[in-house]
Amino acid sequence: MVTRILATVLGCASTLGVHAAQLLPYPVKPLRILVGFSPGGASDITTRIIGQKLSEAFGQPVVTDNRAGASGAIAARIVKDAPPDGYTLLSGATSILAINPAMMAKLGYNSIRDFTPVSQTVSMPQVLVVHPAVKAASLKELIALAKARPGELNYSSSGSGSSSHLAIELLKFITGINLVHVPFKGSGQSMPALLAGQVQMIFDPLPTSLPHVKSGKLRALAISTLKRSPAMPDLPTAAEAGVPGFDSSLWYGLLLPADAPLALVERLNKATNDALAAPDLRERFAALGADAVGGTAANFGQFIAEEIGKWGKVIKAAGIKGE
C-alpha cells in the first residue's frame, strides 16, 4: 500500500512537462477547502487558521466549506469528484482517510487512489483521563487494575469508530485488558458522563480535557502520542508509561483530487509549509494543544497508508462493525 501511495504522489513526474504546460497562472480565483465536520471543531479551526495564511500568500480568498456528515465522507466525495485544478482541496483527517475505509462498506472513495496528498498540517494528541474515583495514579496502575477486574471498568467515547473509541481499543489491543465501551453521540455527551462518574475513563483531545485536569475534576495518566506535549510537559506518553509502541493522534492534512499536476502539488506544498513555519501560526496551534507538522507530499502519503493499516487492524481485532 505504501508503494502505491508513493506512486500516486510521484508517478506523474514523467508527464510533468505536459502538466506544467497546462498550468495557468495560479491562483486566479478563490480556493475552497472542504471540511467534513461542523464549524467549531478542531478540524474546522485549524483549517481556517491555515486557510488565512494561504490567502495571504496567494492574494486570493481561501474559503472553508463545512460539509459535515458520514464521519467526513461527504466532504471527501465532493473533493474526489472535483477537477484537479488546485481550487478544491480536502482537509483530510484521521477518520476520513484512515478509519472510514475499515468502517464503511459503501465509502464512495478510496483514500489512496482518489486523492493527491499535499502536506500533513496538524497533529493533536489525546489525553487518557480518568475520574478521580478510579484508584490508579498511573497508566501502569490502571492496566493492573483492569487486569484484576476484567470487564468491570468502562470508558466513554464520542461514538463507535471515533478517535476516542479507537484509542482505547488500541490500548486494549496492545495490553490485552478488558474494558467496556460506552458510546455516546458526540463529545458533548461523552465528557459530561465521565465528569459525573458514570464512566471511568476516556481518551480525549487535549484542548477539551486540559481544563478539567487543571481543575482537579479529572486525573491525566498519559499522552497518546510518542512525544510529550508542551501544554503538559510533566505528563508521560503512553509509551513511556508502560505501553511501548502506543501512538494515537488526531491529525489533519491537505489533499487535492487524484491526478493533480505535480507542479501544482509542489506549489501548494511549499505555501502550506511556509504557513506552518510562521511563528504566529505555531503559537495559535500551541494554544489549541496542537503541533504544526508540514513535510513533503510523499511523506504525507506514506503516513496515510500506514495509518490505514494500523487502524484497520485495530478495528478488525476489536470486531467493530461499521455501516
Image: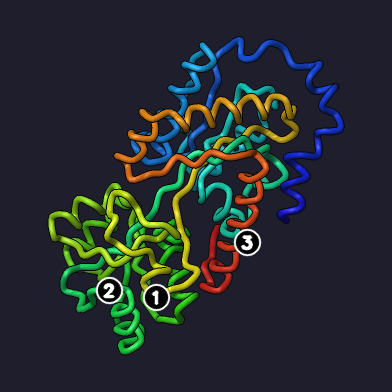
**Element at label 2:** loop
Q: Is 275 drawn above or below residue 189 in the view shown? A: above
Residue 309's disc number: 3
The answer, for residue 156, to whether it is visible in the render is no
> What whole-number distance in Å separates the C-alpha atoms at marks 2 and 1?
9 Å
Q: Residues within 10 Å of mark 1 (few under 14, many from 20)?
A: some
**Element at label 1:** loop
Q: Residues within 10 Å of mark 2 (few under 14, many from 20)?
A: some
**Element at label 3:** helix
Q: Quadrant of the N terminus?
A: bottom right
N-term mark: 3 or 2: 2
The amino acid pointed to by label 3 is Gly
Q: Which residue is painted at 49% across and 15% down in the image?
A: 61
For label 2, the residue is 138
Q: Nearer the viewer, residue 169 or 244?
A: 244
For label 1, the residue is 242
Location of residue 179 (image quadrant): bottom left
Q: Nearer the viewer, residue 13 or 173?
A: 13
Which circle, 3 or 2, is nearer the viewer? 2
> What whole-number distance in Å separates the C-alpha atoms at marks 3 and 2?
29 Å
The amino acid pointed to by label 1 is Gly
N-term mark: 1 or 3: 1
| For the residues bearing labels 2 and 1, Cβ distance under 8 angstroms | yes
Q: Is 11 drawn above or below residue 150 in the view shown? A: above
